[in-house]
Structure formats: C-alpha cells, structure tokens
C-alpha cells in the first residue's frame, strides 16, 4: 500500500531522475567521493558567480550538470519544491505533503533522510500508518529534522550544536567532508541551496520513534 500512497503523493508528471536500483549500495562504495558540482551561476554585470556545490558520498548518484534536479536549478525554489527533484527523497517528500508541513520549510535547514533511511527505520505497515493516519506524530518527527535557521555544513560544524524546530539539540561534528549528528546520522549529499533554506540529505531518520523495520511485513518500498 505504501507504494501506491507514495505514487499518489508525488507531483504529476514526476520530473526527477530516479536513482538506480543499486543506489542503496552506493553508500558503501562511494565513501571516497567528496562531492559533485551542479555548476556556477552566470556572471552578470561583473557580479561574482555563486557556486552551487554539494558534497558527500551520494552526490555522484544524484542529478548534476544540466540534468533536471541539479543543485543550481534548485537554488531558486522553495525547499518543499526542491526536495521533489532529489530522487532519493520520495518518502520524505510524501511525508511533508501528508503532514501539511510544506509551509514550515522556509527559513530553516532541512535534514532530509533518504528513502533507504526510512526503509531501515520503519516497517511498511508502520510507515503506512504514519503517512495515512498518524500524521500528527509524523509531523513532530519531521520537525526534529528541521533546524531553526539556514546553515551550511561548515556553519553547523563550526557551531558544534544546533537547535531543531522541535526544540531539541543536535551535536554536530566533522567526519571528513561530511557532518555527523550525534551518533545517529551523517550527511550523504549536503549543501543544496533553496529559497531561504538549506537542504542536507542524511542517511538516518532522527528522533525518538522506535525502529520497526525488519518485521514479517517489511520489504523495500522504493
């Protein structure tokens, strides 16, 4: 049922390029990759171009260059629209729209777990319940993934601790080119710029909800 629900929640037509079936395995094989670049803004009237560079081991699997969904193309979009173009965020995107949280994705940093991260956290039945019925609970979970101001990876690491919209705190440390949040999650493609927001793709679902993946009803839903 989750597959059908996610399909109905996605924009029509779906314009992003999907990650290949081995995208989950790419996390293990691309650890040496430090990032990819979506390009620079055009130099107009002597204004210094702005670099739209994302970093992390998963970036090589995501749109770049002139592909739809490349980092530069997302820079002028509201964050709730930008996440729709990042192929590994279909579950996060569905959760945002199921909870009506799109309006809160401005003036913030979005720590967006991948589809694989959701699959590793929740069973299929549990995710169905969150998306279809327990939307208040899901909304609070998402707020644990929003920081109170737009911040780059470098700014988060320099701060050492960051505050979430849910009034929690996360410890941030540098792990090579990525940022680590406590002992739970790391950025796998960071520093997407959106309108008055930053988006960092992370590899783990944060928050206090129990892990339910691995049950008899569980299997990949993306």
Image (tube, helix red, strand yellow):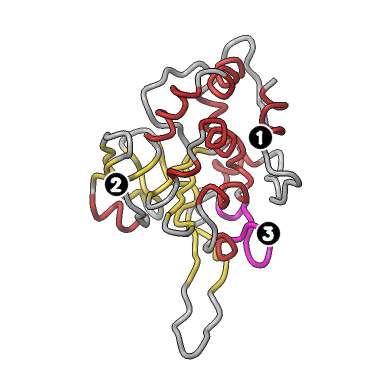
Callout in the foreground (1, 3):
1
- Percent across and percent down for residue 75 are 52, 62
- Percent across and percent down for residue 146 are 38, 41
**Residue at the image position 56 percent from the left and 52 percent from the top:** 82
Q: CA distance from mark 1 to mark 3?
A: 20 Å
Residue annotated with mark 2: 173
Query: Mark 2: few, some, or many residues within 10 Å (few <14, many ≥20)?
Result: many
Q: Compared to 37, does 30 lie above or below?
A: above
- Drawn side of residue 180 relative to residue 214, left or right: left
- Percent across and percent down for residue 215 are 58, 11
Check residue 207 for magenta coloring.
no
- Res 32 label: none
- Percent across and percent down for residue 106 are 42, 51
**Residue at the image position 67 percent from the left and 27 percent from the top:** 221
- Res 9 label: 1
Callout in the foreground (2, 1):
1
CB under 8 Å between callouts 1 and 3?
A: no
Type of secondary structure dominating the magenta stretch:
loop
**Residue at the image position 57 percent from the left and 24 percent from the top:** 131
Q: CA distance from mark 2 to mark 1?
A: 35 Å
Residue annotated with mark 3: 68
Magenta segment, which residues? 59-70
Residue 4 or residue 119, whichever sits in front: 4
Give residue 144's quadrant in the image. top left
Of callouts 2 and 3, which one flags the residue occurring earlier in the amino acid sequence? 3
Badge 3 element: loop
């Amino acid at each position: 049922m989750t597959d059908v629900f996610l399909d109905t929640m996605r924009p029509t037509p779906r314009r992003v390029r999907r990650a290949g079936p081995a995208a989950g395995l790419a996390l293990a094989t691309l650890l040496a990759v430090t990032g990819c670049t979506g390009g620079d803004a055009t130099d107009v009237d002597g204004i210094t171009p702005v670099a739209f560079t994302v970093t992390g081991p998963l970036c090589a699997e995501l749109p770049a260059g002139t592909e739809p969904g490349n980092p530069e193309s997302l820079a002028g979009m509201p964050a709730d629209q930008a996440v729709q173009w990042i192929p590994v965020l279909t579950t996060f995107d569905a959760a945002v729209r199921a909870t009506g949280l799109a309006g809160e994705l401005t003036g913030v940093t979005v720590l967006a777990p991948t589809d694989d991260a959701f699959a590793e956290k929740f069973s299929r039945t549990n995710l169905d319940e969150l998306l279809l019925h327990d939307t208040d609970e899901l909304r609070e979970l998402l707020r644990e993934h929003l920081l109170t101001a737009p911040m780059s990876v470098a700014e988060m690491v320099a701060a050492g601790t960051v505050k979430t919209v849910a009034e929690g705190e996360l410890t941030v440390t540098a792990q090579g080119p990525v940022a680590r949040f406590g002992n739970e999650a790391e950025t796998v493609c960071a520093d997407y710029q959106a309108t008055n927001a930053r988006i960092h793709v992370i590899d783990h679902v944060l928050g206090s909800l129990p892990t339910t993946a691995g049950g008899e009803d569980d299997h990949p839903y993306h």
